[in-house]
Image (tube, rainbow, N blue to C red):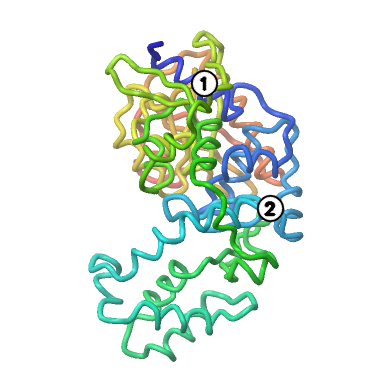
Amino acid sequence: MQLSNRTLNRTLLARQHLLERSTLTAARMCEHLVGLQAQDVAPPFVGLWSRIADFDPATVSTGLDDRSLVRITLMRGTIHLVTALDALRIAPHIQPELEKAPFRKGFNYGAMVGLDPDEVRAHGEAALGDEPMSAADLRSEASRRYPDRDAGAVVQTWLYQLPVLQTPPRGRWRDNSRPVWSRVQPWLGAPLDPSYPVSELILRYLRAFGPASTMDMQAWSRLPAMKKAVSDLGDRVRTYTDARGRTFYDAADLELADPDLPAPVRLLGWYDNALLSHRDRSRIIGDTSATSLRTFTANVSPILLDGYLAGFYKIFVGSGTARLRISPTRPWTKTEAAQVEDEAAALLAYLEPESEPAVEILAPGADMTAPPGSPR
């Protein structure tokens, strides 16, 4: 069967729970999505609000406090909000790839070149110990142990070399505290589980992001040997092709979505995995140039209209007002603009309930990153 772009789009949205909000708990949603991007505090809360009906953000804070949820460096070397179980079974696959980075010449301009990786790791384990430690305290330890090296580079190396996670209070609802780090095993009271097959991880990826090519799988995970992982799944996967003749794999027990399904407006958090987890992102970006994804920096977030990227937004809070500014990537109809405005107002009420909400839709392509009133 040949897949159309629209079939890929609606199937992705359905599996991401972006066609209809789900009744899953936050933990179950994290498990289904194999984590949510959590480089910053707000995005996973926006991602869960966009996917779960009547989502209560306190459930994430509670999960972080009781350690059933954690913020940990995983896919693509970025922080993800995952269940404790997933932290223990996914980290062993990701960790070897992370550990390769610090001693390459391109890492922090070669700041760690010439040092013995095993010795650096041992110092990192001793510095972190079994108790959570702030980044500032880690820098002090790095300066003491390596006075002739850049302390920030040493700390970053330790955070790559060792399986670590961020502990509360950072990550709780509306708590943007500075990171405090802990090694995984002391925090969760359990060792990493290297027995979890990478093929199972890829099958879960397909359930949340498929159908997908092996290049898509690699772009999501940054892991090697995707063809072998698919081969190990045997008849648990089926294959499709697209108009370009590319092979796409999917979980054999899942159906494709109807390409004619309506797709509601969705405002996602910056770095949402729905947009970043394929090598070919046209299934959700459509005809928009991929270079526009650079605007994800500075807390700029995507807007989906009819299932595709159609604009970006950024929120400014100050003087009792929460202003959500929107830059469409194309002209919108009055109906589309009204639908986006309604969803934007609902998001503001959720994120900034104490502030007076204001939604501003700018001209297509306008720069909304400058605060209101600034030249643009």
Q: Would residue 219 appear left or right of 260 to someone viewing this image?
A: left
| Whole-number angstrom distance, CA of label 1 to CA of label 2 | 30 Å
Seen at 66% across and 45% down, the residue is 352
Q: Quadrant of the N terminus?
A: top left
**Callout 2: SS:** loop
Seen at 64% across and 57% down, the residue is 70
Q: Quadrant of the C terminus?
A: top left
Say what amino acid the circle numbered 2 marks.
Trp
Seen at 62% across and 25% down, the residue is 342
**Badge 1, how many Cα within 10 Å: few under 14, some, many 20+?**
many
**Callout 1: SS:** helix
**Residue 334 position within the rendered picture, expressed as x and y whole percent measured from the top left:** 50, 14
Instruction: Decide which of 287, 127 is in the foreground and name it.
Output: 127
Question: Picture quarter containing residue 45?
Answer: top right
Instruction: Decide which of 226, 278 is in the foreground and name it.
Output: 226
Q: Would residue 150 appear left or right of 205 to someone viewing this image?
A: left
Seen at 59% across and 77% down, the residue is 133
Question: Picture quarter containing residue 300?
Answer: top left
Say what amino acid the circle numbered 1 marks.
Thr
Instruction: Return the residue at label 1.
Output: 11
Q: Is residue 293 above or below residue 17?
A: below
Question: Picture quarter containing residue 368?
Answer: top left
Instruction: Decide which of 246, 102 is in the foreground and name it.
Output: 246
Instruction: Decide which of 191, 329 is in the foreground and name it.
Output: 191
Instruction: Return the residue at label 2.
Output: 173
Q: Residue most toward the top? A: 260
**Badge 2, how many Cα within 10 Å: few under 14, some, many 20+?**
some
